[in-house]
Image: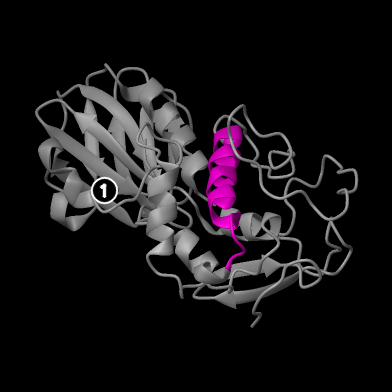
Amino acid sequence: MPEGDTVLQTAARLHAALAGRVLTHADLRVPRFATSDLSGRTVLDVTARGKHLLTRIEGGLTLHSHLRMDGAWRVYAPGERWRGGPGHQIRAVLTNADHTAVGYRLPVLELLRTSEESKAVGHLGPDLLGPDWDPALAVDRLLAAPDRPIGEALLDQRNLAGIGNVYKCELCFLARVTPWLPVGALPDGVLPRLVALAHRLLDANRDRPTRTTTIRAERRPRTGAPAPAPPQRPLPPLRVQEPLYVYGRVRRPCLRCGTPVRKVDEADRPTYWCPGCQSGPMP
């Protein structure tokens, strides 16, 4: 599932394949931009902003895309078979002499003036993996709606940019609260530690091929970073095949207390939690 770490990796792959090279072919398969001709222009860079991708192109243009739930960009060598999905799912093709980048199932694809990128990403809160990361500002934005459930607030990219459904569930587990607990009901000091932990987890996964939250990031804070409250009992030894604490582990025993993990579907998003060691409201 594309979240901030996945999008950052996608941006790095696209940048390596496209930046500094002239487009020999470009095909945007959305009605509004289908006639746009980008061939002959040089791609300047590809940047991630939260869960958004900004491909900046010579002439003051930016191709803005968002992966949402199942979008993807794939990079292929000349003559390599495209394997990202059927042809009708392709939304963008960017080709140069060395690579072809193909965007599949992109729910958001638009061509903007680079000077107007703020129309697409200006609403975002501080980026957990960006140079603008500001934990104090993220905490302030979360606290601005104290009655809002913490899980919902973490997903709101206007508060902090980069958290998706997987991290929402895992962060609430690590904080020992259910995703439905209001932000204002969190115990004193938990929210700043939770925000710091979110940053550490995404940063730890920024270069990992497989996302994991069981890397003891909550027990190995970086120098100067506040650590969340220690668990009430030591966590059991983790096996390599357990990359996540609760996400995707419905009915399996909690890695902390052994209680079966539960799941509920909300607005097309599954929420996982442990009723044994996460306190707060439950559906």
Q: Residue 80: x, y in percent? A: 47, 28
Q: Is residue 262 visible?
A: yes
Look at the image and tell me in which quarter the C terminus lies.
bottom right
Q: Is residue 67 visible?
A: no
Element under label 1?
Answer: helix
The segment highlighted magenta reads 186-205
- Residue 112 horizontal side relative to residue 259, left or right: left
Residue type at the position of mark 1: Val
Q: Which residue is mark 1?
A: 121
Residue at the image point whose x is 55% and y is 56% from the top: 191
Q: Residue 251: x, y in percent? A: 81, 70
Indicate yes or no whether the magenta region holds residue 204: yes
Classify 73 as above or below 2.
above
Nearest the viewer among 204 and 139 is 139
- Residue 189 horizontal side relative to residue 244, left or right: left
Residue reaching furthest to the front:
188
Residue at the image point whose x is 15% and y is 33% from the top: 38
